[in-house]
Amino acid sequence: MRTLAYPRVSRLSEEIKKLISHIIRNELRDPRIAPMTSVTVVEVTRDLRYAMVYISVLGSEEEKETTLEALKNSSGFVRREIGKKISARYTPEVIFKLDQSIEKGFEIQKVIDRVNKQETINRDSEEEEFKIED
């Protein structure tokens, strides 16, 4: 979804992101929510009815699944808290989704590091061959 063309939606998305981050960190007491949970992006639809909340969980697959389940179960509470703190005609329905982009970024970085290391090893071995021949 592109919120750049709709500044109000973009501002609301950012405000909701801050609120949900605060709620997860300070108000939800569910032990299933992993301590390393963060809200990466919030996308509010143009009609302000739905807010797609992408979360990142640093941990095992089981922790990710249980955290997502706990957040889905608490979506009514989160929506009510948002409604208390923002003044909008509608309080958007909160839909939590898992954001895998950070993990994918780590995987890509590992591949890049491995390729760079291999290139360095190959370059060093080529230099050694030239030194022996000289």
Image: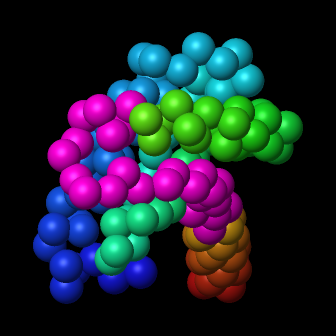
Quadrant assignment, res 98: bottom right
* Residue occupying the point 45% across, 23% down: 25
Magenta run includes residue 94: yes
State which region is magenta.
81-110
Is residue 110 placed above or below 63 in the rendered structure?
A: below
Is residue 128 placed above or below 60 in the rendered structure?
A: below
Is residue 115 placed above or below 40 in the rendered structure?
A: below
Quadrant assignment, res 30: top right
Give the left or right position of residue 103, taking residue 69 as reference.
left
Residue ranking furthest to the front: 89
Quadrant assignment, res 13: bottom left
Residue ranking furthest to the right: 62
* Residue occupying the point 51% across, 52% down: 94
Residue situated in front as seen by the camera: 96 or 108: 96
Quarter of the image where the C terminus is located: bottom right
Tell me if I can see residue 103 in this picture: no
List x then y, in percent, for residue 68: 70, 43
Give the left or right position of residue 13, taking residue 32 as reference.
left
Is residue 133 placed above or below 115 in the rendered structure?
A: below
Quarter of the image where the N terminus is located: bottom left
Residue situated in front as seen by the camera: 83 or 70: 83
List x then y, in percent, for residue 41: 42, 57
